[in-house]
Image (cartoon, rainbow, N blue to C red):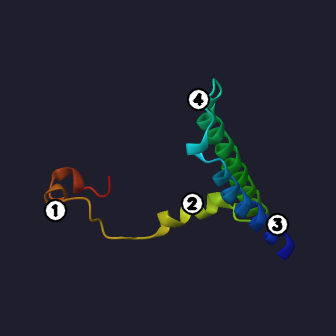
């Protein structure tokens, strides 16, 4: 597990530091120079999306997505005071026969 964490840390650090080698102020003045920024942005997108996929797979394998349907119903079991309905709305006739 430590080797995996070390490998992920090395990939993450290198992914964050290597794009700094392409300095935008040193771009060449040619017909291809207008695509330098687009290429850099696309490369950065693929690097970060790849890291996000790896993080998702690690969380999935660690079991963080098991029984999500049960986890989603837990807030429905909490009984709280109704702060959103004003007092004048509770005095109307439609509320006299119970919960709507």
**Label 2 or label 1, whichever comes before in sequence order:** 2
Q: Nearer the viewer, mark 3 or mark 2?
A: 3
Q: Residues within 10 Å of mark 2 (few under 14, many from 20)?
A: few
Query: Residue at 73% across / 60% down in the picture?
Result: 14
> What is the CA distance from the residue labelled 2 to the residue labelled 1?
30 Å
- Indicate left or right for 83 with 52 as reference: left
In the rendered image, the vertical position of residue 94 relative to residue 27, given as above or below: below
Depth order, front residue of 19/86: 19
> Which mark's residue is nearer the viewer, 4 or 2?
4
In space, the residues marked 3 and 2 are separated at their CA atoms by: 34 Å
To which residue does mark 1 refer? Answer: 87
- Name the quarter where the N terminus is drawn: bottom right
Q: Earlier in the sequence, mark 1 or mark 3?
A: 3
Q: CA distance from mark 4 to mark 3?
A: 35 Å
Q: Secondary structure at mark 2?
A: helix
Disc 4 target residue = 34
Image marks 1 and 3: residues in contact by CB distance under 8 Å = no
55 displayed left or right of 97: right
Which residue appears at 69% of the width and 61% of the height?
67
Return the mark for residue 72: 2
Q: For mark 3, what is the residue?
A: 7
Distance, label 1 to label 3, CA atoms, is 59 Å
Circle 3 packing at 10 Å, graded few (<14), some (14-19), many (20+), is few
Q: CA distance from mark 4 to mark 1?
A: 63 Å
Task: Please report whichever mark, 3 or 2, sits nearer to the chain's N-terminal start.
Answer: 3
Residue 94 drawn at (x, y percent):
22, 50
User: Is residue 91 or residue 22 the one in the foreground?
Assistant: 22
């Amino acid at each position: 597990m430590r080797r995996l964490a070390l490998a992920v840390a090395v990939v993450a650090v290198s992914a964050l530091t290597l794009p700094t080698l392409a300095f935008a102020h040193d771009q060449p003045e040619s017909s291809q120079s207008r695509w330098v920024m687009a290429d850099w942005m696309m490369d950065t997108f693929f690097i970060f999306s790849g890291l996000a996929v790896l993080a998702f797979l690690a969380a999935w394998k660690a079991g963080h997505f098991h029984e999500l349907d049960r986890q989603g119903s837990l807030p429905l079991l909490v009984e709280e005071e109704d702060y959103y309905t004003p007092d004048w709305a509770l005095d109307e006739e439609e509320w006299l026969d119970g919960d709507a």
